[in-house]
Image (cartoon, rainbow, N blue to C red):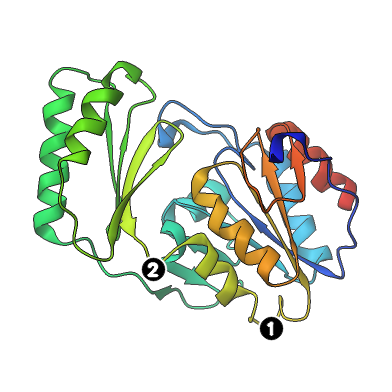
Amino acid sequence: MSARAPAPPILPLDRIALFLDLDGTLIELAPRPGDVVVAPELLSLVERLHTRSSGALAVVSGRPLDSIDRLLAPLHLPAAGTHGAELREATGAPVHLLGQPLPGELRDRLSSIAKELQSQWHGVIIDDKGSAFGIHYRLAPEAEPALRKALDGLVLEEPWHILPGHCVYEIRAKDRTKGTAVQTLARAAAFAGRRPVFIGDDRTDLDGIAAAVALGGHGIAVGGLNAPGAEWTLPDVPAVHDWLRRLL
């Protein structure tokens, strides 16, 4: 169990490549995705790590890339957005769109489900990312059984599937994951030849951890995430920040 794994040791920044989840790992979770706060101290820390690792640091998030860039402005780091459907291999590099858009009929059905729930629970939030669709219920946890029942009634064609997360159900493609993002980024110039280290706190991060381990690297599970492939664990976001500072 990852929750019982030891804390990670201090790893040499000139030999590793850091792949960092955002929400719940680098920044605290918030009731709404737009409510998160990024402290200037975190921006400075991430920028220093990116410089000291010679560019071998990437943010790998379920958020779209434009949302990642807004939160981390003025930084434009190597990153994977929407679970690998959007990819930027280096600072200043073009963004590659790898995921197909959600079919219109499926998007309409998901919007209808969410709006029906919103008529009863105003805390249900829609998060349409183009190639993925999230329905959040952190502000209305009592809506979860009805949401789950409605989603269970969907018949999804390949490659679409439903993935539960922290107070969210997300519909996305099976073939674009944080794992495929790590595999692609690990071949980029700044990352090649280094041991990948993936840090994440949610079920969507399990693919990233597995990919890092398969490439000869390591996984770090945050907040008690049950990640069988994770060699180490950190209890919360402040502990992640502390460990990253110690790398410097």
Q: Which residue is mark 1?
A: 189
Q: Are marks 1 and 2 in contact (CB under 8 Å)?
A: no
Could you tell me how far apart the alpha carbons at marks 1 and 2 are, in whole angstroms? 24 Å
Query: Looking at the picture, how far across and down is residue 225, in whole percent?
Result: 61, 38
Task: Name the amino acid type tagged 1.
Answer: Ala
Query: Looking at the picture, how far across and down is residue 228, in whole percent?
Result: 65, 48
Q: Earlier in the sequence, mark 1 or mark 2?
A: 2
Q: Is residue 129 visible?
A: no
Is disc 1 surrounded by few (<14), some (14 to 19) or many (20+) residues within 10 Å? few
Compared with 90, 151 (above or below) is: above
Q: Is residue 225 left or right of residue 106?
A: right
- Secondary structure beneath dot 1 equals loop
Label drawn at residue 33: none
- Secondary structure beneath dot 2 equals loop
Query: Looking at the picture, how far across and down is residue 9, in whole percent?
Result: 90, 49
- Residue at image position (58%, 37%) is 24
Task: Name the amino acid type tagged 2.
Answer: Asp
Compared with 59, 211 (above or below) is: below
Q: Is residue 218 left or right of residue 177?
A: right
- Residue at image position (10%, 49%) is 108
Compared with 130, 148 (above or below) is: above
Q: Which residue is mark 2?
A: 175
Question: Which label lies toward us, 1 or 2?
Answer: 2
Is disc 2 surrounded by few (<14), some (14 to 19) or many (20+) residues within 10 Å? some
Q: Is residue 134 visible?
A: yes
Q: Nearer the viewer, residue 119 or 70?
A: 119
- Residue at image position (53%, 46%) is 71
Q: Nearer the viewer, residue 38 or 201?
A: 201
Query: Looking at the picture, how far across and down is residue 63, in whole percent?
Result: 44, 51
- Residue at image position (51%, 63%) is 80
Please tell me in which quadrant of the rendered image residue 42 appears: top right
